[in-house]
Amino acid sequence: MDAPRARASAVRAVSAPLLPLLRPVRSGNAFEETVERLLQAIKLGVVAHGEKLPPERELAAQLGISRVTLREAIRALQDAGFLDVRRGRYGGAFVVYEPPRPGQGDLRRAVKAMGQGGLEDALTFRMAVECGAAEVLASAELTAAQRGTLTRRLEEVNEAAPADYRRLDTAFHLSIAELTGSPLLAAACADARLRVTDLLNAIPVLGPNIEHASVQHAAIVAAILARDPDAARRAVAEHLEGTAALLRGFLS
Amino acid sequence: MDAPRARASAVRAVSAPLLPLLRPVRSGNAFEETVERLLQAIKLGVVAHGEKLPPERELAAQLGISRVTLREAIRALQDAGFLDVRRGRYGGAFVVYEPPRPGQGDLRRAVKAMGQGGLEDALTFRMAVECGAAEVLASAELTAAQRGTLTRRLEEVNEAAPADYRRLDTAFHLSIAELTGSPLLAAACADARLRVTDLLNAIPVLGPNIEHASVQHAAIVAAILARDPDAARRAVAEHLEGTAALLRGFLS
DNA sequence: CGTCAAAAGTCTGGAAACAGACCAATGGAT
DNA sequence: ATCCATTGGTCTGTTTCCAGACTTTTGACG
């Protein structure tokens, strides 16, 4: 139809470096992906020991999969001993899992499972999105309710029993992202956190680290409440660098 | 098996605010999702006018879908006039599309298509991830090749013809993310950019804006090359705020 | 102690997606 | 003029996944 391009036969290949766009449309297998998701939710403590998952129909809708597929995943987690499924009214899929005594050999295995370069990728990604979230939040004018949520989460982490520490730490970090009011940003932070969960679960929760972390957490909250974006970003960066260094330390 | 929980019947529901984890496992329909992806790649100029998509087999593998599904998507884009598919050796799916003369009424439609709160979400997300990427990059020690890529992309934007401007601007922004070496971060930035593409395409490319932007682009590159993370972050923030303001201006 | 609502468990037919083999056209190279 | 590698086009059988109706279990409540 248009002569110019016809003879041109401009067989320019697709530009090499711009291919993050052509990343996978679907993450392989719905069943496996669902198992992974639920497992992460359990390990993150989003659904803690003794709690139950939402009803199958509801959960299936949220995950965008059919009930059949969801049930297969739940069944797998039941067989693996993570869930206890009870039927009848007031039944459901109850979490029967407590974070393991962090072993030492686990860490290398977890790192290996991330693949080549995966660790640095995850840490970099987390640094970028969490710093961004803190900065955004510190730039916004918060309502009293939002400030309350933030300080409450901070207190919860500080008072946490060792067994609950990771879970509440996660909740604290994620609430920063959620309070920005940007679902995309919150999802990105959740994703980033997920990618380091297995690693964090593989290292012990040590007193000095907790104390150090709680000082940093307090600094983050203070900066956000003071509406000082620069300070908030720096505080988060420092905190995450500490975590990253801790991980690298256990690896060397 | 374990008496303690049996009677406990701890029917604590799943904690309300921590549900970004239970987001959809798969984005609905593989076909539609693929069409969307390809369309975005075309509109972003990742595959410019006259270029062709990678061979079907290759592209299907990259997208993680079957060739059948990919072909349906390509067919749809062909019918819609975005692609011209030719067979035989040296054939392929050629892009027959040029960014439209930016209309004025389009913007509101594009915004409406994003849904309630979608605009602020996208802008916030973009601000967070792109600032993060710039900061990460400015913190790293770059090779000569990386510095070269960055400055080359900058020059390309500055010399761009109006018709090519958006495409090269996109390439510039994305290369910052790519140079961080974090695929996750690069994907996040690409995603963020995608979400505002339709909006940007709906507003005219004005001389003063371009000049303003090119000054800011230069500042970004300078800060990165000077290894000044703070300045890099600020420069990106300023630049994106400019874009956001421009969009809001056209909306009011 | 029976009722009943909410939950898991089951079944069936159909649509979507896939894997892989094979066919057909095209145009540069020989 | 012919060859042939490369690319799109087609076909077939299989697997995965889904939508929705229906059944069964359970335990709080009246």
Image: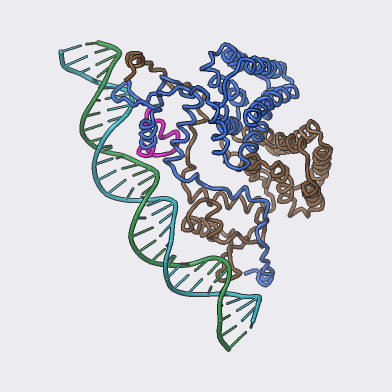
Chain colours: A blue, B brown, C cyan, D green
Q: Is residue B32 above or below residue C29?
A: above
Does residue B22 appear left or right of residue A176 in this picture? Answer: left
Q: Report the residue at 71% width, 18% height from top.
A: A223
Give the magenta range.
A55-69
Q: Position of residue B241 (x, y in %)?
A: 74, 34
Q: Is residue A50 above or below residue B111?
A: above
Q: Is residue A61 magenta?
A: yes
Q: Nearer the viewer, residue B62 or B200?
A: B62
Q: Is residue B139 above or below residue A170?
A: below
Which quarter of the picture shows residue B183? top right
Q: Is residue A21 magenta?
A: no
Q: Quadrant of the C terminus of chain B?
A: top right
Q: Is residue A131 visible?
A: yes
Q: Is residue A221 above or below residue D10?
A: above
Q: Position of residue B232 (x, y in %)?
A: 79, 35
Q: Is residue B157 visible?
A: no
Q: Nearer the viewer, residue B208 or D16?
A: D16
Does residue A39 appear left or right of residue B99 in this picture? Answer: left
Q: Nearer the viewer, residue A178 or B144?
A: B144
**How many numbered marks, from 0 up?**
0
Q: Quadrant of the N terminus of chain B?
A: top left
Which quarter of the picture shows residue B251? top right
Q: Report the residue at 68% width, 15% height from top.
A: A215
Q: Position of residue B216 (x, y in %)?
A: 81, 39
Q: Position of residue B248 (x, y in %)?
A: 70, 35
SS majority, magenta = helix
